[in-house]
Image: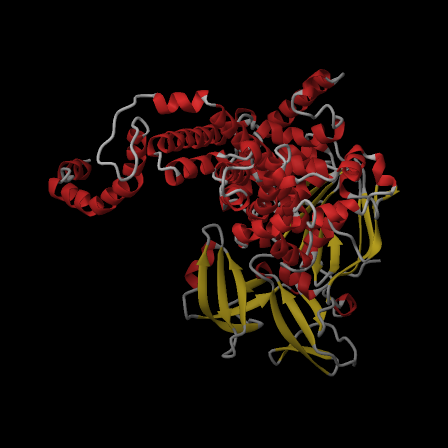
């Protein structure tokens, strides 16, 4: 007992000197974090309430005028529609396809590696270059897509209304058609993104304990579906949350496809006018920093909101272990 | 409940022959241990019985039905895995309920939200919950039912794995080294519990272990496996006292049995150059080995059979094991002595040893037991 008491008495007081050194050592990192990461966000937040343009010596406070415009003008309504269409389409499809491809590739032996490489190719390729290739393929008259579709004319394919209309009035203009433009962009987003998701899911699959499948079989899980729900899907929980978060953020950030296809204005009738392109157009091309900042702040809020929802889901539902 | 039978099972992984024609019958309600060193094929044999591996040839029969080509899920067996293989995202209660949910509920009834309103689902759920409670009661894990496997200790997980196996009423229970991840104290305790569980359920148990003590203490019969073959399958007493093969004798028993070379000259047998006063066995010259359990050796002051120097002493309290070096080449025997004999065995002291001829086991050069010679030599009383 005596020894214990002595130990308590001899316990050193929190040393001021030590604490100061610690702060001193952490200071450069803290300063950099503040300067590089937080200051720009704050600046954007402040500028979103002004009418500042680059080069001007001063600016006027305009209050919430920029935000009011965002929610009243039809251009911005189109922006929201295009952005959410893209996110809501691309995220589930690229996650679902990524998971499906990962399960199939995982069940293969050595050939799986070849599939992995092929599916990962679009991820590695520059989207800008790929977009040009797509633009050629989707050209209304000389493009590969429409010429291939035209080959179906005169056959029983014409029973399908799409082909019947196409053969009579010409196939869609794709990139030039305001009904198709955003879906083409979505398709390219899925095509480009699911390989990345597949690789993430594959790494998640390797951590599934093999004996669990044997246990599931002994417990009477006869179909692959049963085993998937009992073993695979729960084990992939953490991976799935990560993949969905990453996919959402990437989907909100879509820009290069739009810029490559329609450098002048976000698609026919602004049907593919996504947020990132709007920020670029307003803030950089038209030098309207105020409105550009307002869209940026809104963008940040969306992404933060999504991330928060996902964090909640993770803590409540997903099992890590 | 049913008996099990495997006939001439062979299994090959590439070039390696893991099982070389294994035949084994297990009666209804029997507790049989498959014991052997790692890599002997015992786990493979269990997995083939379970249906998780397919044999290259041979048949598996459960009860009266041949199940060689039946998939594991349809064989009506329960298995406890070495790693326990609990579903990490499910609570203990849900884990134990899985075999019942999978087998007794339709896939529609199992659906998360819609399942609850399917006809019969409520009744099913109720009866499953009762079965889970009964299994948890039997294993005294009631308070753990709401926890996830990650929050349990090794011993608790092991119990949950057992619970998941016995929540149903399968044809037989298969246990694959279920105690090997537990600490020594818990292993001894769980050993007793599993043996008692077997008596209570009266079910067929097939138990794989590399630990001969587990096999000896729990089983009705032990099948000793080595190099893909069953060397002997008999009760623990017979396996210990009357092994067919020197490898069985060496594997079972702790400390290990002492093996001494015997020379034959003419019709007489010699141990270290001294004739053994046994009956003459005839002329056929053969190299032989004699197995002596540590308890068959005793200290002998006058006219010992052989002498040696005490090289190492292990005092376990109730008994003392002394390693005695017989010659300079490192041949050692282990002697079991009582604490009263402790003063006679000093490290480095020379001691004389004798043995009980009736306890000696004679093997030929290949390790096969030579019961005939033992009878001729008068070691074992002749059986009519």
Between A9 and A189, which is closer to the camera in this rendering? A189
Can you see residue B235?
Answer: no
Q: Which residue is at a point 74% across and 79% down the rendered structure image?
A: B286
Residue A145 at x, y = what percent? 71, 47
* Residue B291 percent across, percent down from the top left: 64, 66
Give the image's coloring scheme. Answer: secondary structure
Q: Is residue A103 left or right of residue A274?
A: right
Q: Nearer the viewer, residue A108 or B10?
A: A108
Which residue is at 62% across, 69% downward?
B259
Q: Which image quarter holds the C terminus of chain B?
A: bottom right
| Vertical placement of residue A115 versus B162, above or below | below
Q: Quadrant of residue B39?
A: bottom right
Does residue B200 lie above or below A150 as drawn? above
Residue extending furthest toward the bottom: B266
Q: Position of residue A249 (x, y in %)?
A: 48, 37
The residue nearer to you, when weighing A303 against A294, is A294
Q: Quadrant of the N terminus of chain B?
A: top right
Residue A301 visible in the shown view: yes
- In the image, taking residue A290 as reference, residue B134 lies left or right, namely right
From the top left corner, tell me how far across and down residue B248 is, in percent: 68, 61
Q: Quadrant of residue B269?
A: bottom right
Residue in the picture at 62% in, 39% down = A176
Q: Is residue B126 left or right of residue A200?
A: right
């Amino acid at each position: 007992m005596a020894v214990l008491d002595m130990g308590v008495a001899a316990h050193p007081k929190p040393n001021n000197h030590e604490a100061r050194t610690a702060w001193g050592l952490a200071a450069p990192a803290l300063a950099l974090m503040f300067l590089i990461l937080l200051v720009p966000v704050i600046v954007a937040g402040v500028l979103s309430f002004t009418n500042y343009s680059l080069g001007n010596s001063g600016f006027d406070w305009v209050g919430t005028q920029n935000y009011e415009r965002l929610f009243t003008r039809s251009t911005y309504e189109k922006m929201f529609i295009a952005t959410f269409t893209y996110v809501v389409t691309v995220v589930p499809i690229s996650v679902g396809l990524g998971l499906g491809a990962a399960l199939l590739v995982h069940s293969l032996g050595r050939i799986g590696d070849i599939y992995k490489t092929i599916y990962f190719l679009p991820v590695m390729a520059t989207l800008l270059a790929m977009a040009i290739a797509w633009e050629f393929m989707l050209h209304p008259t000389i493009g590969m897509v429409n010429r291939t579709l035209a080959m179906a004319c005169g056959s029983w394919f014409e029973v399908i209304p799409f082909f019947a209309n196409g053969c009579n009035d010409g196939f869609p203009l794709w990139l030039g058609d305001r009904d198709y433009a955003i879906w083409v962009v979505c398709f390219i987003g899925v095509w480009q993104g699911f390989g990345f998701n597949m690789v993430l899911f594959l790494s998640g699959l390797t951590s599934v304990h093999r004996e669990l499948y044997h246990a599931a079989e002994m417990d009477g899980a006869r179909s692959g579906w049963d085993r998937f729900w009992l073993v695979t899907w729960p084990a992939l929980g953490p991976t799935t949350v990560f993949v969905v978060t990453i996919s959402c953020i990437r989907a909100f950030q879509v820009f290069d496809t739009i810029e490559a296809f329609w450098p002048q204005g976000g698609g026919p009738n602004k049907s593919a006018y996504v947020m990132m392109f709007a920020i670029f157009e307003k803030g950089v091309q038209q030098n309207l920093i105020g409105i550009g900042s307002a869209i940026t702040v809104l963008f940040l809020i969306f992404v933060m909101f999504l991330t928060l929802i996902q964090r909640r889901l993770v803590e409540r539902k997903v099992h890590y272990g | 409940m049913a008996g099990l039978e495997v006939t001439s099972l062979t299994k090959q992984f590439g070039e390696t022959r893991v099982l070389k024609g294994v035949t084994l019958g297990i009666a209804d309600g029997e507790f049989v241990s498959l014991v052997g060193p790692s890599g002997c094929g015992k786990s493979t044999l269990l997995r083939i019985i379970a249906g998780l591996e397919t044999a290259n040839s041979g048949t598996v029969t459960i009860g009266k039905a041949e199940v060689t080509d039946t998939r594991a899920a349809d064989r009506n067996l329960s298995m406890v895995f070495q790693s326990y293989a609990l579903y990490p995202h499910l609570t203990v209660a849900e884990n134990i309920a899985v075999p019942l949910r999978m087998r007794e509920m339709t896939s529609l009834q199992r659906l998360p939200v819609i399942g609850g309103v399917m006809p019969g689902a409520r009744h099913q759920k109720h009866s499953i919950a009762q079965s889970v409670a009964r299994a948890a009661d039997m294993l005294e894990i009631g308070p753990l039912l709401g926890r996830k496997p990650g929050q349990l200790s090794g011993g608790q997980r092991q119990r949950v794995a057992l619970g998941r196996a016995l929540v149903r009423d399968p044809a037989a229970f298969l246990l694959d080294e279920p105690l090997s991840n537990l600490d020594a104290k818990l292993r001894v305790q769980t050993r007793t519990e599993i043996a008692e569980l077997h008596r209570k359920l009266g079910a067929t148990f097939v138990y794989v272990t590399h630990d001969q003590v587990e096999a000896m203490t729990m089983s009705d019969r032990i099948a000793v496996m080595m190099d893909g073959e069953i060397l002997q399958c008999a009760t623990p007493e017979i396996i210990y006292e009357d092994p067919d093969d020197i490898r069985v004798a060496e594997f079972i028993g702790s400390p290990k049995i002492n093996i001494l070379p015997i020379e034959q000259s003419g019709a007489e047998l010699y141990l270290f150059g001294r004739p053994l006063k046994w009956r003459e066995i005839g002329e056929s010259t053969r190299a032989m080995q004699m197995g002596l359990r540590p308890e068959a050796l005793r200290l002998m002051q006058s006219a010992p059979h052989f002498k040696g120097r005490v090289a190492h002493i292990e005092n376990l309290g109730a008994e003392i094991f002394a390693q005695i070096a017989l010659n300079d080449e490192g041949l050692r025997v282990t002697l079991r002595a009582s604490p009263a004999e402790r003063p006679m065995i000093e490290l480095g002291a020379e001691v004389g040893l004798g043995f009980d001829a009736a306890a000696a086991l004679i093997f030929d050069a290949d390790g096969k037991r030579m019961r005939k010679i033992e009878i001729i030599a008068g070691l074992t009383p002749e059986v009519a």
